[in-house]
Amino acid sequence: AIFGQLVYLFFTVLVIYAHLLLLFCIWLFPSWAVRYPWMLGLLRSTFAWAALDVALVSMWLTLVEMKSSQLAYVRGRTKSELEIFTGHALPNNMFVIDVDFNIGAYLILPAVVLHQLIGRRVLAHLADTRDYLCPS
């Protein structure tokens, strides 16, 4: 269980923020890509690993699925026994998940789109700059 949590933390938090930080640093200081060529390789590999679009879609689908699921649906004899035990009438779905998509969920969408556009533009610009500064 701890290994799964560490993997989740690594791929959902650390890789995404490390990629965004590296993209920002190379955008501010393009000469770093020429001086440290490993940074460009790391940026390209974490661009695919960050997968902000996949994270957004999976978050939305997970929340929609949780809202439509019936986690603790009881009926028949089990429901009758629980009502006798508690002394109250119980609903069939005993665990209701209510999900509302507020403004925060929709603010992520432009960030994902801008990440794709800006990331590709920065990588293309760096490739042009690197070819200009260091011709083969």
Image (cartoon, rainbow, N blue to C red):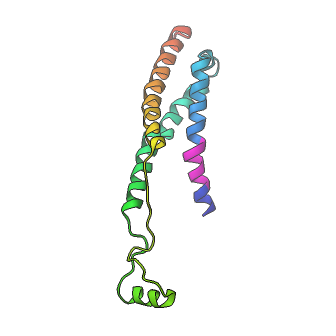
What residue occupies the far front of the structure in this picture? 88
Where is residue 127 shown, x and y percent of the image?
49, 17
Where is residue 58 shown, x and y percent of the image?
42, 49
Q: Nearer the viewer, residue 106 or 14?
A: 106
| Vertical placement of residue 32 versus 103, above or below | above
Q: Main secondary structure of the magenta part?
A: helix
Residue beneath the point at 43% across and 32% down? 110
Which quarter of the picture shows residue 92? bottom left
Residue beneath the point at 43% across and 37% down? 109
| Vertical placement of residue 59 versus 38, above or below | below
Where is residue 114 shown, x and y percent of the image?
45, 28
Which quarter of the picture shows residue 28? top right
Residue beneath the point at 47% across and 33% down? 111
Residues rendered magenta in the picture: 6-14
Q: Nearer the viewer, residue 64 or 30?
A: 64
Where is residue 17 shown, x and y percent of the image?
59, 37
Residue 37 at least partly seen: no
